[in-house]
Image (spheres, grey):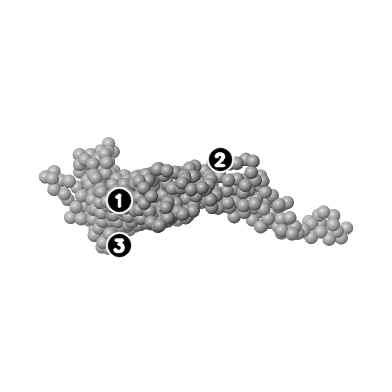
Amino acid sequence: MPVHLQQIQLYGHQRRPLVCTILVIPRILLLNITFLVGQNNLNDGNQKKVIQKIQLNDNNSWAIGGGVSNFIMHGDLRSVGTGSLGNFWNFGAYAYVDKMFNPLLGMEFKVNYSKISGGAQYFSNVYDILYVNSTKIGNNLFFKGTSYGAELNLILSFSNLYIANAKKWNISGYFGLGYHQYDSALYEKLADGSNNLLVDFGKNPARNSVYEASSIYLSGQFGIKYRINKRVDLELRPSMYFNYEDHLDATISNKQDWETFFVTHLGVTIKLGKKKIFTIWGDESKQIENKFEIVDTDDDGVIDQLDKDPNTPAGVQVYGNGVPIDSDADGVPDYLDKCIFVKGLKENNGCPFINDIDKDGIADKDDKCQEV
């Protein structure tokens, strides 16, 4: 009989606030983009540093795609390399819509559906499973269920950092946040070959989600596209996911808070629009006009597309957004501030006004003879 989990939503685990991780990701990505682009082919003789030129004229920027996938669990239970129950194959499907803002950056909305299952590996030191009475992870345990959800990904074309006109191959990274629901259930294989249900996360009235468990997740994906023709691309996309809960495999333990799983995608991309070329593929058949230029005018290591102050004087240290560093946050950048670590006024070169009636160089508050 399945165990009803009265306190399942209070796992007793202490987790790092996920919002901290989510908020820092865009900054890291933007800094990495700036660093990678900034290393590429600077024209040292020019005041304007042209880093990359990519043709934007007559380009389509929307695409749809989809295909088949294979899910591999890597938690307390795993889909590959298990014990006597063998490997578990979990096929699914996915579909997405892509929008490229320029040849480097875009966004993707993707939906997923997959079978999920896995078994126990052989452990020399087995450990307890929480919320299931007198049960340890062993070779006779396995889980199965289905998962469906959606995710929003930032697309970064690695190829277009270095190649202005890729002909056949494109490599891109996908980094995002998603949400999925699942009905995973934990079983034990008995000696007579029958399956005994231990806990069902798909039908548990003690949970907020009455019929299904759910979780948000982070993902990092590596897409390799092969251009078949101007309308169709073939894509292979191995992906790694970080699940924020510990019950995707229907098994909760004190060993971990997060779970990881891997999904391999294989599908096609259909490029929409009436133009002759899609944004990530350059068109060498035409003379290059109206180029999309990634430049770093002030040579501060931050490309102009991300630089809030593209005319910073040479040698000035800047933040990741290209703005000069202001240590005391008084609105006067350090290279103009005569009192770098003391808040002051712009009209006084970043220093505070000091009352000195007798003009002897000693502030009135410290001067015992203010009129002498």
Q: Residue at x 24, y 53 (%)?
A: 145
Q: Choose between 225 and 365: the one closer to the eye.
A: 225
What is the number of the mark on residue 67?
1
**In-image side of 29 versus 327 (left or right):** left
**Amino acid type assigned to the residue bearing label 2 in the image:** Asn
Which quadrant of the figure has residue 88? top left
Mark 2 sits on what residue? Answer: 41
Residue 144 in percent (x, y) is at 23, 50
- Nearer to us: label 3 or label 1: 1
Query: Do labels 3 and 1 touch, CB within 8 Å?
Result: no
Q: Residue at x 44, y 51 (%)?
A: 279
Q: Residue at x 23, y 55 (%)?
A: 200
In this rendering, the count of numbered labels is 3
Mark 2 and mark 3: Cα distance apart in space: 53 Å
Mark 3 sits on what residue? Answer: 209
Residue 225 in percent (x, y) is at 38, 45
Task: Decide which of tag 2 and tag 1 comes sooner along the chain.
Answer: 2
Residue 29 in percent (x, y) is at 49, 49
Secondary structure type for disc 3: loop
